[in-house]
Amino acid sequence: MSNSGPFGWFRLWHPPSWTAETVDGATTFTAPDESGVLTVTPIWLKREPVKIGGGVEAPASIRLSPGIAEIADPNRMFPAHRRVRSLQPLEVGQQSIGFEGEAAFTGRNHWWQKLWPRRAWRKFRVWCVRHENVHLLALFMQSGEGDPEAATIASMILNTLDFPDEPALPPEQFVDRAVELARQRFPKLKCAASGRLQLTVGVFDIDLEQSYRAYVQAPDEFESILVPVLTTVMEADDDLEHVRDRVMPLLCSEQVWRERFPQFIAEPWTSDLVVMYVVDESHAYWFIREELTEQWGLDVDELRELAVENLEQYYEDEPMELTVAEAEEGPRLLIPSRPDVYNSARLLSPKFQASLRGVLGREFVVGLPSRDLFVALSLECPETVSHIQTRVASDFHQMEHPLSDRLLLVTHDGVTEYLPWA
């Protein structure tokens, strides 16, 4: 089975008998019977220029950030260790180093130390692999006497690592580079980062999420992806007659709106969510300010009606594909098959609510862990609802553009927070 790292930085393969779980960018592979745990943590580090004599800089391919030996140093990772020796370097990446030994945990500062009692000596293997700016810290821990076969398989998993020729920049540096590009093309306008994957150019606030997704798939095409976005937005006309059919609603958490976008129009929806309004520009969108609605002569009710009409037309032109999980008595759960910035906002549409009601029953619940994803499920099975509630709360803390860690109840009367004990 294959597993991809964040931002397309790497891909590796593991046996189906090993389970994989990714939390906060780190992926944990657990051997059968929990005989060992392999954790792969990606790190992006800038590599500083190195002088090789006469003021000449070394080629970029050999410029080093903190040495890989420092990153994987057992002295740094384990206060108490013994029998440490070097391992054969992995056959992947531009550089790699590895060590094995035994460690005794005198404290519980690292998550893996919570798995075993204090002071127990445990076998470990640790590697660091570098490819360009991407560094992977891989740690394999075992309990008891250890399982040599599991340790061998852990090494084999790491030797399947595959890296792209040019790794994609992480989101923060992608935005920094986008700011530089915008300043080059529009030197008279104020250009600045305004949030994670958010860029302000003049009076326009541009969401770069879709652009970043395209860039991750083709890191060598940065300018060809960004230039059309910047050009389209800067040539945008805010005359209502020219943008009327591109005004769209967008869900946002109330906290994020207050902290990052208070200058833009928003109205409460339900629970801890608000509805913001944007003008869609194919590869990006820009937020609508209250003064612009005054210029248009629209009140909030009229703006909402226009945006929902456009949202329904958007999904008529590009139908949403849903993954359906069924039980004996019928469909139980629906999830969009692909991410889209307007997926969660579609719950604002009475027509869409009615179509879901026809599948899931008169009343159903929805989870909105992120802007690009929702899960809708029947109330027929309380155990499933409870499981999904836990999953939504977990995904909320891991996904881009998080919305809510709560479930919502959809009825003929509207949408409210789901309170199972009420």
Image (cartoon, rainbow, N blue to C red):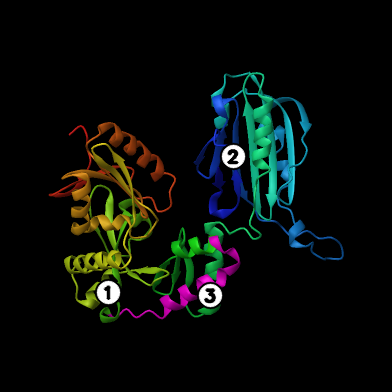
Q: CA distance from mark 3 to mark 2?
A: 44 Å
Dot 3 amino acid type? Arg
Quarter of image, res 348: bottom left
Which of labels 1 and 2 is toward the front? 2
Q: Position of residue 288 (x, y in %)?
A: 31, 69
Magenta span has 105?
no
Is residue 88 visible to the viewer in this orientation of the structure? Answer: yes
Quadrant of the drawing holding the N terminus = top right
To which residue does mark 2 refer?
Answer: 14
Q: Are marks 3 and 2 in contact (CB under 8 Å)?
A: no
Apparent side of residue 185 relative to residue 331 in the rendered image (left or right):
right
Residue in the image at 68% along x and 35% along y? 126
Residue in the image at 58% along x and 27% along y? 113
Task: Assign a secondary structure to mark 1.
Answer: helix
Q: Position of residue 156 (x, y in %)?
A: 67, 38
Tag 1: Cα neighbours inside 10 Å, few (<14), some, or many (≥20)? some
To which residue does mark 1 refer?
Answer: 245
Residue in the image at 13% along x and 49% along y? 412
Q: CA distance from mark 1 to mark 2?
A: 48 Å
Task: Assign a secondary structure to mark 2.
Answer: loop
Dot 1 amino acid type? Asp
Q: The magenta stretch spans which residues?
A: 217-239
**Nearest to N terminus: mark 1 or mark 2:** 2
Apparent side of residue 105 relative to residue 213 in the rendered image (left or right):
right
**Nearest to N terminus: mark 1 or mark 3:** 3
To which residue does mark 3 refer?
Answer: 183
Quarter of image, res 177: bottom right
Apparent side of residue 213 relative to residue 361 in the rendered image (left or right):
right
Dot 2 amino acid type? His
